[in-house]
């Protein structure tokens, strides 16, 4: 396909105008947020409201979420319904939901009526069921929101927006442009238009530019057929990671969501896919660190609940490593210099394993590691581990020999480096592959298992080799 004429491979070049009243750069949300809360503590509500209004809507929502509940309620009471609607429309979903929780159902519904339907559905799914149901009952057009609530937020149906420009395939380009004008400002976020038949089934795509530049008497389907646009769509139940993978691989700016009969339910825009990519990357990173679902300033009890079990598990794995060292207690007592190099062996294996497991888990997340490529990946990482192990063996072995004057120690340290780097490669790649095969998220616990194997086997190889070579060679 020609990249210049592909209806999806060209990212729509909509101009992003700066928010009204914004100067050369947005204000610092941290400084202004602290100043607004300080003004509240001094009883200067008017000053706090003025400072709050100088912030962008997304930053206002984040501030309101982080503020203590009494201060949050007071700040919300200082804002107009239009200002609150802007916050709910632009703030991250958790922040928008935190603001909505403080509103009565009728008040929340009046504000959400002015918010994008897709965003409203996301916010409602973050609320308690009773509160969400009460708000839906007060909405002016609940029939636009309720269909979206049947889809989980992490699926294509949860990502899509049902408000998008579409035109019938039998209308002319001139009439299609008139219809787009009736769509109003909401059309500005779309560079492409879905072409549908009388049954709302997807038949093609056409760019707004092509509609504007073509003969007004040509039918929309003629324009769609002229550029031979490949029809790509996704079902509503598809996981959001797979949706992002498709949009990223083919540089799509929109992807329609269709039902089993190819009726268009909505479209997913590139900006939504980008948000998913950021959320998924953050989630994977936190899981690898055994801190899933946490935020920097999140509640302490959640941090304890998320981290403590993994710390207890890690304590158990460390005790296993200690038991291995205890097996060679007499050897260490007789050859005390072995103890000096235990952190070297464990440290090198740990960092090598972490490098491998991070690369493999991230590659799985973005679709770079299909199931059929598991053995090839394992072989590559083992070869890489051998190369790294031999290089580090030469350096560490020479250091041990020169430092302690013991050729046996140098050989033992070299053997431990090669062995532990191979263990790190095998477990760093093998554990995520095995967990995925078992249906377990590889990001959740791979790092803990990898660290355990590198510590235990690294100590075992080094101390066993040390007991043999130091006694033999001195």
Image (spheres, rainbow, N blue to C red):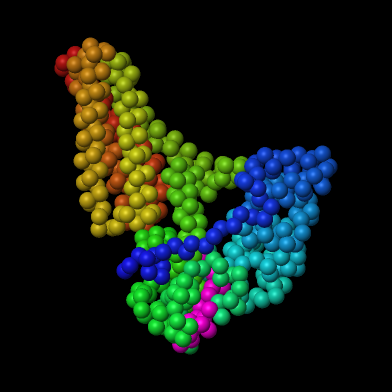
Question: Image quadrant of residue 79?
Answer: bottom right
For image coordinates 45% across by 42% down, the residue present is 289
For image coordinates 29% across by 24% down, the residue present is 328
Q: Nearer the viewer, residue 215 or 189?
A: 215
Can residue 323 be seen in this snapshot? Answer: no
Question: Image quadrant of residue 127?
Answer: bottom right
Question: Can you give x and y, in whole percent of width and height, for residue 247 in the image?
Answer: 41, 63
Number of marks in the rendered image: 0
Quadrant of image for the N terminus:
bottom left
For image coordinates 26% across by 35% down, the residue present is 421
Can residue 300 be seen in this snapshot? Answer: yes
Quadrant of image for the C terminus:
top left
Residue most toward the right?
A: 43
In magenta segment, residue 248: no
Question: Can you give x and y, in whole percent of width and height, for residue 392 in the image?
Answer: 25, 28
Q: Relative to residue 239, is residue 194 depicted above or below?
A: below
Q: Which residues are magenta?
A: 159-177
Question: Can you give x and y, in whole percent of width and height, for residue 256 in the image?
Answer: 45, 72
For image coordinates 80% across by 44% down, the residue present is 47
In magenta segment, residue 168: yes
- Viewed as shown, does residue 470 lie left or right of 182? left
Q: Relative to residue 358, is residue 146 depicted above or below?
A: below
Q: Relative to residue 52, is residue 153 depicted above or below?
A: below
- Viewed as shown, does residue 87 lie left or right of 442? right
Question: Can you give x and y, in whole percent of width and height, for residue 173 in the image?
Answer: 48, 82
């Amino acid at each position: 396909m020609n990249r210049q004429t592909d209806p999806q491979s060209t990212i729509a070049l909509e101009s992003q105008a700066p928010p009204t009243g914004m100067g050369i750069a947005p204000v610092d949300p941290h400084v202004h947020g602290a100043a607004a809360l300080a003004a509240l503590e001094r009883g200067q509500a008017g000053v706090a409201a003025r400072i709050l209004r100088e912030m962008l809507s997304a930053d206002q929502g984040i501030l309101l979420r982080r503020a203590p509940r009494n201060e949050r309620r007071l700040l919300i009471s200082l804002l107009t319904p239009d200002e609150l609607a802007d916050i709910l429309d632009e703030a991250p979903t958790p922040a928008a939901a935190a603001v909505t929780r403080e509103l009565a159902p009728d008040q929340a519904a009046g504000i959400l009526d002015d918010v994008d339907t897709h965003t409203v559905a996301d916010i409602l799914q973050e609320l308690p069921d009773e509160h969400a149901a009460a708000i839906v009952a007060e909405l002016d057009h609940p029939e636009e929101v309720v269909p979206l609530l049947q889809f989980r937020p992490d699926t294509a149906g949860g990502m899509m927006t049902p408000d998008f420009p579409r035109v019938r395939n039998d209308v002319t380009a001139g009439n299609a442009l008139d219809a787009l004008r009736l769509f109003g400002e909401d059309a500005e976020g779309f560079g492409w238009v879905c072409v549908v038949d009388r049954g709302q089934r997807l038949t093609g795509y056409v760019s707004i530019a092509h509609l504007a530049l073509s003969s007004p008497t040509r039918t929309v389907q003629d324009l769609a057929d002229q550029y031979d646009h490949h029809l790509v769509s996704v079902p509503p139940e598809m996981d959001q990671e797979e949706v992002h993978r498709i949009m990223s691989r083919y540089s799509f700016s929109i992807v329609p969501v269709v039902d089993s009969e190819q009726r268009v339910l909505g479209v997913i825009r590139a900006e939504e896919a980008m948000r998913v990519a950021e959320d998924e990357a953050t989630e994977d990173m936190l899981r690898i660190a055994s801190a899933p679902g946490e935020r920097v300033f999140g509640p302490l009890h959640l941090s304890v609940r998320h981290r403590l079990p993994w710390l207890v598990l890690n304590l158990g794995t460390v005790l296993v490593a200690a038991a291995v060292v205890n097996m060679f207690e007499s050897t260490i007592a007789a050859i005390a210099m072995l103890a000096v190099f235990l952190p070297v062996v464990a440290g090198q294996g740990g960092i090598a394993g972490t490098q491998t497991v991070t690369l493999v888990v991230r590659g799985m997340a973005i679709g770079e590691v299909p199931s059929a490529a598991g053995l090839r990946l394992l072989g590559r990482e083992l070869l890489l581990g051998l190369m790294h192990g031999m290089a580090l063996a030469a350096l560490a072995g020479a250091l041990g020999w020169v430092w302690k004057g013991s050729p046996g120690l140098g050989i033992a340290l070299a053997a431990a480096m090669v062995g532990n780097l191979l263990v790190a490669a095998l477990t760093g790649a093998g554990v995520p592959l095995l967990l995925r095969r078992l249906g377990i998220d590889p990001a959740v616990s791979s790092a803990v298992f990898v660290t355990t194997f590198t510590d235990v086997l690294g100590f075992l190889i080094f101390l066993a080799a040390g007991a043999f070579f130091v006694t033999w060679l001195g």
